[in-house]
C-alpha cells in the first residue's frame, strides 16, 4: 500500500484528475488530501465531487481541512466574512456550484466540509494543511495553526517530532524547492507540497504535486484548467 499526499487543488479538477491518473491510484493506496480543494480555480464543485466519488467507489481517502474551507463555512453566517471569502476565491466557487449565494449550496457538500480533519499522523509522518505551532505547549493543541500558520520552520522541536516528518501545503512553493526539500527530508524533516497549482503565471509553480510518502517520490502535473476568471 502506498501513502500519497496531495494538497491545495484550488478548484483545478482537470489537473487533479490528470494527477490521479499519472500516479495510477488504486484501492490499495491511501490518498491523503491536505485541504484547499476550493476557490480560485474554475471547478471547486468538481474537485469535491471527484473526492466523494473516490470514497463512494471504495478508495481509501483521508481529507484535511484548509483555510479556504474554513472561510467558506464562516461565509454562511457572517456577511463581512462572506465578502472577504468572495474576494479570496469564493466567487469562482459559487459559480462552479451554479448558485447565487453560498447558503444555496446543497447539504451534501456541507456534510463533506463538516467531516474534514485538521491533521493526520502515523509513526512516520504528520500531515497538516498549513503548519504546526511548536512555541506554545503541545504542538497539536493550536488548531488555527493547522489552517493558517506560515514561517514556522525555525521553531520545529525535533525531539518532539522524533522519527516523523511533517508534510504540509498552504504556502505556494516552486517545484524546484519541493524537490530540494525531498532531498533534505532526512535532516530537515519537513516538506511543503503546495506547488501553487492555480498560479499558472509564476515560474516554477502552476503545478499540482503528489508526494508518494511510501517510496519518497514526487509527481507533478502542470495545470490543465483555465485560470482566466481568477486572473482577469
Image (spheres, rainbow, N blue to C red):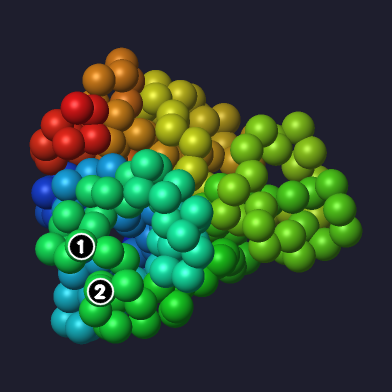
Q: Is residue 59 visible?
A: no
Q: As displayed, is residue 28 above or below residue 215?
A: below
Q: As displayed, is residue 190 above or below residue 23?
A: above
Identify the residue shown where x is 79% and y is 38%: 155
Q: Secondary structure at mark 1?
A: loop
Observer-nearest of 58 and 227: 227
Q: As displayed, is residue 119 above or below residue 57?
A: above
Quarter placement of the N terminus: bottom left
Label of residue 100 in the image: 1
Identify the residue shown where x is 88% and y is 58%: 137
Looking at this rendering, what residue extends furthest in the right direction?
Answer: 137
Observer-nearest of 121 and 196: 196
Identify the residue shown where x is 23% and y is 48%: 92
The CA distance from mark 2 to mark 1 is 7 Å
**Residue matched to label 2:** 104
* Image spot of residue 201 (x, y percent): 25, 20
In the visual, does 205 lie left or right of 13?
right
Q: Is residue 157 visible?
A: yes
* Image spot of residue 189 (x, y percent): 63, 41
Looking at this rendering, what residue extends furthest in the front direction?
Answer: 79
- Specify few, some or many for label 2: CA neighbours under 10 Å numbering under 14, 14-19, or 20 or more: few
Observer-nearest of 112 and 87: 87
Identify the residue shown where x is 53% and y is 39%: 191
Q: Secondary structure at mark 2?
A: helix
Quarter placement of the C terminus: top left
- Specify few, some or many for label 1: CA neighbours under 10 Å numbering under 14, 14-19, or 20 or more: few
* Image spot of residue 91 (x, y percent): 27, 49
Asked if disc 2 and disc 1 are in contact, CB closer than 8 Å, the reply is yes
Q: As displayed, is residue 114 above or below residue 99?
A: below
* Image spot of residue 8 (x, y percent): 37, 47
Quarter of image, res 49:
bottom left
Amino acid at each position: 500500500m502506498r501513502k500519497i499526499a496531495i494538497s491545495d487543488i484550488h478548484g483545478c479538477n482537470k489537473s487533479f484528475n490528470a494527477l490521479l491518473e499519472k500516479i495510477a491510484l488504486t484501492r490499495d493506496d491511501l490518498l491523503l488530501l491536505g485541504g484547499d480543494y476550493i476557490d480560485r480555480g474554475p471547478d471547486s464543485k468538481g474537485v469535491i465531487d471527484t473526492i466523494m466519488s473516490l470514497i463512494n467507489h471504495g478508495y481509501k481517502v483521508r481529507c484535511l481541512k484548509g483555510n479556504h474551507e474554513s472561510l467558506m463555512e464562516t461565509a454562511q453566517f457572517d456577511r463581512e466574512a462572506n465578502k472577504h471569502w468572495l474576494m479570496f476565491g469564493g466567487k469562482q466557487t459559487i459559480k462552479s456550484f451554479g448558485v447565487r449565494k453560498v447558503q444555496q449550496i446543497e447539504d451534501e457538500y456541507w456534510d463533506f466540509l463538516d467531516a474534514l480533519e485538521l491533521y493526520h499522523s502515523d509513526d512516520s509522518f504528520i500531515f497538516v494543511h498549513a503548519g504546526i505551532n511548536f512555541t506554545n505547549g503541545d504542538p497539536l493543541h493550536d488548531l488555527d495553526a493547522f489552517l493558517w500558520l506560515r514561517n514556522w520552520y525555525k521553531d520545529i522541536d525535533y525531539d518532539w517530532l522524533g522519527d516523523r516528518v511533517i508534510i504540509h501545503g498552504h504556502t505556494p512553493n516552486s517545484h524546484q524547492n519541493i524537490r530540494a526539500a525531498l532531498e533534505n527530508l532526512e535532516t530537515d524533516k519537513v516538506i511543503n507540497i503546495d506547488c501553487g497549482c492555480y498560479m499558472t503565471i509564476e515560474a516554477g509553480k502552476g503545478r499540482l504535486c503528489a508526494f508518494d510518502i511510501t517510496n519518497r517520490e514526487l509527481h507533478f502535473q502542470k495545470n490543465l484548467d483555465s485560470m482566466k476568471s481568477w486572473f482577469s
